[in-house]
Structure formats: C-alpha cells, structure tokens
Amino acid sequence: MPDINVSIYLPLLKSIKTHVNRMKHISPYLYVSANMAGEFKLRVETDAVTVGTLFSNLQNHRFDGCDDQGDAEYMFEACINGKRFSSFLGTPFIPNKAICSEW
C-alpha cells in the first residue's frame, strides 16, 4: 500500500452534491483539498472568479502503519472533472460514510 498523505471522513455526500452541482456550471474542473486537521475544501476557478466551500471539524481516518508526522494544516489537493464527480454523487447508492484519501 502506498504512503497516504491524508485520509478524512467526508461530510454527507448529499451536501457535497449540492455544492458540486452549483460549481460545475462555473468551471468544468473542481479542486478537492483535504488536510489532517479535519478540513475538506471544494473549489472552482475561472479568470474572473474563485468560488469555494470549506467543511471543517471532520474526523481523520487512520490507517495501520501510517505515520502522523508533518504539517497537519497542509492541504493536499487534486483536480477532478466536476461533471463526472457530480454524476458519481447522483448514483442511487450513496453510503452513509465515505473516506477521501490522497497518496
């Protein structure tokens, strides 16, 4: 298993879906960020505007053998296709808990 930089329990996926559905009309790409301080951020950018939302006070998921060294405030980020992520969130099966991990 690769070294995991951050792993966090996501907020309710229905609430994420609401934000993603609004953001996908601003830009086709969505930036997803998280840190070990319990923060999860969604953001879109254009030449004219940057729009984001921050979820805080989330719990971190700890994997066996994962060291906790480093800056807990550092945001690890990925750029994803907003429309595809929205489509994924629109599937009939939405779990009660989800984990976002970046390695």
Image (cartoon, rainbow, N blue to C red):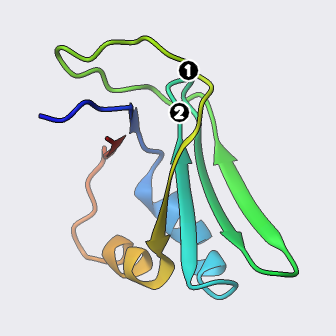
In this image, 97 relative to 2: left or right? right
In this image, 92 relative to 74: left or right? left
Q: CA distance from mark 1 to mark 2?
A: 6 Å
- Circles 1 and 2: CB atoms closer than 8 Å: yes
> Which quadrant, please, contains the C terminus?
top left
The image shows residue 64 at horizontal and vertical percentages of 17, 16
Residue flagged by tag 1: what amino acid is it? Ala
Residue at the outermost right position: 48
Vertical side of 7 occupied by 27: above or below: below
Q: Nearer the viewer, residue 82 or 16?
A: 82
Mark 1 = which residue? 72
Residue at the outermost left position: 1
Vertical side of 53 occupied by 8: above or below: above
The image shows residue 92 at horizontal and vertical percentages of 24, 75
The image shows residue 91 at horizontal and vertical percentages of 27, 76
Q: Residue 90's quadrant in the figure?
A: bottom left
Residue 24 - label: none
Q: Residue at x 38, y 81 (%)?
A: 84
Q: Residue at x 55, y 77 (%)?
A: 29
Residue 35 - label: 2
Could you tell me which secondary element the residue under label 1 belongs to? loop
Residue flagged by tag 2: what amino acid is it? Asn
Dot 2: within a 10 Å radius of its alpha carbon, few (fewer than 14), some, or many (20 or more) residues? many
Q: Give the number of callouts.
A: 2
In this image, 92 relative to 7: left or right? left
Could you tell me which secondary element the residue under label 2 belongs to? loop
> Which quadrant, please, contains the N terminus?
top left
Q: Residue at x 32, y 26 (%)?
A: 61
